[in-house]
Image: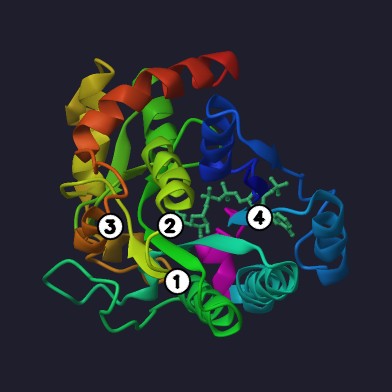
Amino acid sequence: MERILLLGGSGILGTEVLRVLQQEKMEYVAPRSSDCDIRIRNLLIHFMQDFKPTWIINCAAWTNVDRAENSYQEACDLNEMAVENIAIAAESAGCKVIHISTDYVFDGESETPYTEDSLVNPINKYGESKLKGERALLATLPESFVIRTSWLYGVKGKNFVKTIAGKALRNEPARVVDDQVGSPTSAKDLAVGIVSIMRIQPAPGIYNFSNEGSCSWFELARKVYKNLGADPGLVEAIESQSLNLETKRPKFSLLNKDKWKAAHLGPVADWQSSLDTTLPEIVAELNQKGEV
Ligand SMILES: NC(=O)c1ccc[n+]([C@@H]2O[C@H](COP(=O)([O-])OP(=O)(O)OC[C@H]3O[C@@H](n4cnc5c(N)ncnc54)[C@H](OP(=O)(O)O)[C@@H]3O)[C@@H](O)[C@H]2O)c1
């Protein structure tokens, strides 16, 4: 029987992983960051000695892309050093690791979807810190799994789709960039994929996962407005440059999923159908929190 230590179980992705673990009646613990701060190696080792996991799923991360520019060391503490802690603790306990990474390890200059072997070249500090984390994990525990994903959204936590859904339901206008292209990824779909890695145990290494198809942030926002019965005309397309943001973001984020599919890790749903399935739950969450 597998025993799973889920880290970051309160985040966008972690809450969906938790849900799948519960549905599948798997044995798990999902400590809060206040109970198991993964930057403190001994705390992590202590947790592992108590629970004796066979797998660690790491959904914990520093995810504030803009703040990483001026708080790079703090971002690295979580995205690199803590991941190394996980690798060291897992190695000594003989436990396997699934770790989540990002399309931001790429510079966005490609015109074809990035494969797992494409040249990495992060253009912001968050991407740099995440790349360092991948490398730290695979250097210590090469038999680990790293899943690179993009444009993650879900019911819990702060994310683009949820923010835009709130604006749509309040009939507010939104100005959204139209010059960055990617694949939205439903945290629900990725969570199912993560559990399928434990079940299938393909060759270790890096795997890409996002939903199928592509759009710009503007197109995604318009689809959310349309789905929720709001006027898509309220969404205005703008160029990234006009936002004067300090942090660079890749303008092209598509990930090639051939390796995922060849390993039979499960279906890769179209982004639009996954959005259709998830939006009602997002709306219910916004209502419950009194945000709309
Ligand atoms: N969001 C995206 O668009 C996106 C895109 C591509 C890849 N990713 C990657 O996907 C993964 C999941 O991201 P997400 O958006 O679901 O993250 P998130 O919602 O920001 O959640 C981050 C999680 O990390 C936990 N955490 C923070 N500091 C910790 C610490 N010191 N010790 C233990 N846990 C700690 C948080 O717990 P508390 O709530 O207790 O602080 C929270 O559960 C990350 O690896 C991220 O880099 C995200």
Is residue 209 shown above or below 184?
below
Pointer 1 or 4: first along the chain: 4
Q: Amino acid at mark 1?
A: Glu
Q: Position of residue 185 (x, y in %)?
A: 33, 45
Q: Which residue is mark 4?
A: 54
Nearest to the observer: residue 58 or residue 94: 94
Nearest to the observer: residue 150 or residue 227: 150
Is residue 24 shown above or below 140?
above
Pointer 3 or 2: first along the chain: 2
Per the model, the C-alpha gap separating discs 4 and 3 is 21 Å
Does the beta carbon at disc 1 come under 8 Å from ligand 1? no
Residue 201 disc label: 2
Pointer 4 or 3: first along the chain: 4
Q: Regarding mark 2 in the picture, which secondary structure is present there?
A: loop
Q: Which residue is mark 3?
A: 263
> Which of the 4 image quadrants contains residue 123?
bottom left
Magenta part of the protein: which range? 58-69
Q: On the rendered structure, is 133 left or right of 95? A: left
- The structure residue drawn at horizontal position 64% and vertical position 49%, both measured from the top left corner, is 8
